[in-house]
Amino acid sequence: MWPARRNFPVIRDLGFSVDTNLTMTSQLANVCRSAYYHLSRIAQIRDSISTTVCKSLIHELVTSRLDYGNAILYGISDRHMHRLEMVQRYAARIVREIRRGDQQSMTTILRQLHWLPVRKRIDFKLLVLVH
């Protein structure tokens, strides 16, 4: 009659990887892996492109992935949120050509780029959806 039902640890639907406990660990791993791949490629060509082109590439290849469906990430653990924040910080360092050891406030850099921090992006997305 009906085929036997199989249990999968992670289900992928509409581009989201959802695990059985709804911890979003798999989804975050996929987003971070993809983002770091694109950021490392952009960093390799950063000297050859303008800041405007760099911001555009990062927006198209990285930020859009961070923002896609981020409303379902509301309430994730601080550990998981930190992983997304690290991606955003790396992107900001590439745009501003800041080396890893330079002592500059990341909050100031994000504000200069007019980028909301990841947690506030999630909150903003929820507020837009509710309104």
Image: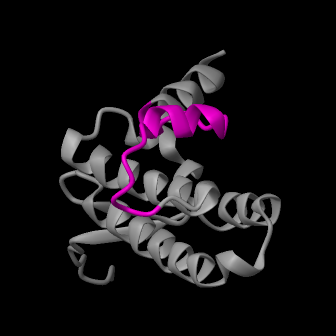
Confirm whether the magenta stretch covers residue 75: no
Q: Position of residue 81 (x, y in %)?
A: 31, 44
The span picked out in magenta is 99-119
Seen at 51% across and 57% down, the residue is 93
Seen at 51% across and 32% down, the residue is 108
Seen at 50% across and 44% down, the residue is 70
Rendered position, 84 above or below 108: below
From the viewer's side, name the closer residue of 63 and 72. 63
Rendered position, 58 above or below 42: above
Q: Residue furthest front?
A: 102
Rendered position, 92 above or below 62: above
Image side of residue 27 versus residue 110, left or right: left
Image side of residue 71 versus residue 9, left or right: right
- For the C terminus, the quadrant is top right
From the viewer's side, name the closer residue of 116 and 100. 100
From the viewer's side, name the closer residue of 57 and 34. 57
From the viewer's side, name the closer residue of 47 and 43. 47
Q: Residue furthest top?
A: 131
State the count of labels: 0
Confirm whether the magenta stretch covers residue 105: yes
The quarter of the picture where residue 95 lies is: bottom right
The quarter of the picture where residue 109 lies is: top right
The quarter of the picture where residue 75 lies is: top left
Seen at 42% across and 33% down, the residue is 119
Q: Position of residue 57 (x, y in %)?
A: 72, 67
